[in-house]
Image: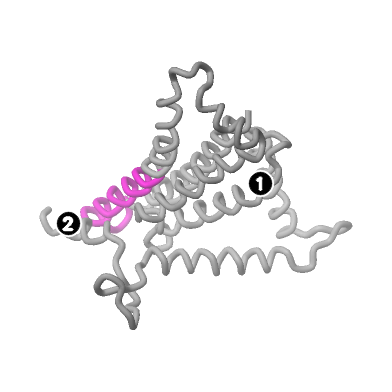
Amino acid sequence: MGNISEEIAENLGSKGVIPLPFEILGETSITNSVVNTWIVMVLVGLVCFLLTRNLSVEKPKGPQLALEAIVSFANNLFQSALGPHGKAYYPYLASVLIYLAVSNTMGFFGFTPPTKDINVTASLALMSIILIQVSGIRKKGVGGWLHSFMEPIPVVTPINIMELGIKPLSLCMRLFGNVLGAFIIMELLKAFCALIVPVPFSCYFDIFDGLIQAYVFVFLTSLFMNEAME
């Protein structure tokens, strides 16, 4: 059991895999989270390139129909949360949704999900909270945005200001905790029964749960944006 715990603890860290020829505050290397993110970027870019070739209005083929179904799903999701006034933010939210969906399911194919690294989830949460505040400022103006911290009554202003940190923290820890928990469970199953039993669990934790977490992260971001723009 001690060896298993040590192996899991070793895999939990974001390990350096590509050393750099220079040093910044000590030894520097590119971590596996960054490398796997590059893999996701190349994979998504390649799939988008293949799916968008030879598009046809009159005779759409299977890949084009699948792509249109995905785009329609994303548009319906964001429209239900943001409404038509938030259409300018659909591309960013769709990009995050695709990135998280692919990253969270990488474990099924033997890769380490980048979202297992809290630095990745914290960065995503930080970008989301910045987008939330920017959307509020663009809709209400700076004065209206500042006044929203005093709503519904001025006495709750400190609580509303605290939400600036609470919201990204909740987004970060929810995504990180679920991906990390799934990773630990799968490592334990592989250690004790490595042949057949982990397969259905891997389908659940690496695919179904990973897709659900991607959906929840983006949907909550959309809801927070809608709240900021109201």
Instruction: Choose between 165 and 56: the one closer to the eye.
Output: 165
Instruction: Choose between 217 and 156: the one closer to the eye.
Output: 156
Furthest residue to the bottom?
Answer: 21
Q: CA distance from mark 1 to mark 2?
A: 43 Å
> Which is the main secondary structure of the residues drawn in magenta?
helix
List x then y, in percent, for residue 213. Answer: 46, 43
In the image, residue 38 lies in the stretch drawn in magenta: no
The three-letter code of the residue at mark 2 reads Ile
The three-letter code of the residue at mark 1 reads Tyr
Q: Residue at 62% of width from left, 32% of height from top?
A: 229
Q: Magenta segment range? A: 175-197
Q: Residue at 40% of width from left, 50% of height from top?
A: 122
Q: Secondary structure at mark 2?
A: helix
Quarter holding the C terminus?
top right
Question: Which circle marks residue 4 in the picture?
Answer: 2
List x then y, in percent, for residue 16. Answer: 30, 70
Question: Which circle marks residue 90 in the picture?
Answer: 1
Above or below: residue 1 compared with residue 56: above
Q: Residue at 31% of width from left, 45% of height from top?
A: 181
